Image (tube, rainbow, N blue to C red):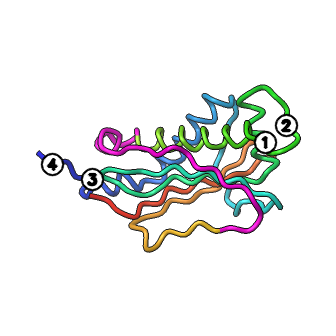
Amino acid sequence: MACSLRESVHLVSDPRNLDASVDEVFQLMLGVDARRDAGPPEIEPELVTAVVGFGGLLSGACVFRTGGSAAMKIAACMTGMEFTEIDDTVKDGIGEICNMLAGAWKGKVPDLSANCGLSVPAVITGRDYNIHVQAPEFKLEHTYRFADACFAVTIVCDGIQ
């Protein structure tokens, strides 16, 4: 019997799953409480964005976006090291956080977990860039904060079977 997510799109697009995934990953990997923030993400001169693609019954991406100082704080919590610049370790850490968030999120819906793969994370740094997805089926985008570090997580679905 063919599996379809179309009937469970309300479960897949439930924003509580994203909040729970952020809570799990940040508690487990960083030992911090990350809570949803009502405001837009703070704009820093240097941005760090990680993208993990979804493929299978759902196509789309998990996008993790933060400023450079927050990226260094996240990497410091992960590694126990201090950072003064966005080096390869910081980029790898942000990519891995995005990967874990994507995995935790898709694990919230059993059919999605079993029938959707993840790409290797891609990490982008810079000052002026946009990630565009044409006509998504749904998009979840929330800003979170721990201490004075702010970040945004977006789940975008451009196709669901």
* Quadrant of image for the C terminus: bottom left
Foreground mark, 4 or 3, reads: 4
Q: Is residue 115 covered in magenta?
A: yes
Q: Which residue position holds label 4? A: 2
Residues shaded magenta: 107-129
Foreground mark, 1 or 3, reads: 1
In primary-sequence order, the first of circles 3 and 2 is: 3
**In the rendered view, does 134 fall on the left or right side of 74?**
left
The spot of residue 36 in percent (x, y) is 64, 50
Mark 1 surroundings: few (<14), some (14-19) or many (≥20) residues within 10 A: few
Instruction: Report the residue that reaches farthest toward the left.
Output: 1
The type of residue carrying mark 3 is Leu
Q: Residue at x 35, y 40 (%)?
A: 113
Q: Which residue position holds label 2? A: 83
Q: Which mark is residue 152?
A: none
The type of residue carrying mark 4 is Ala
Residue situated in front as seen by the camera: 81 or 10? 81
Q: Residue at x 67, y 55 (%)?
A: 124
The spot of residue 75 in percent (x, y) is 74, 36
Q: Which residue position holds label 3? A: 5
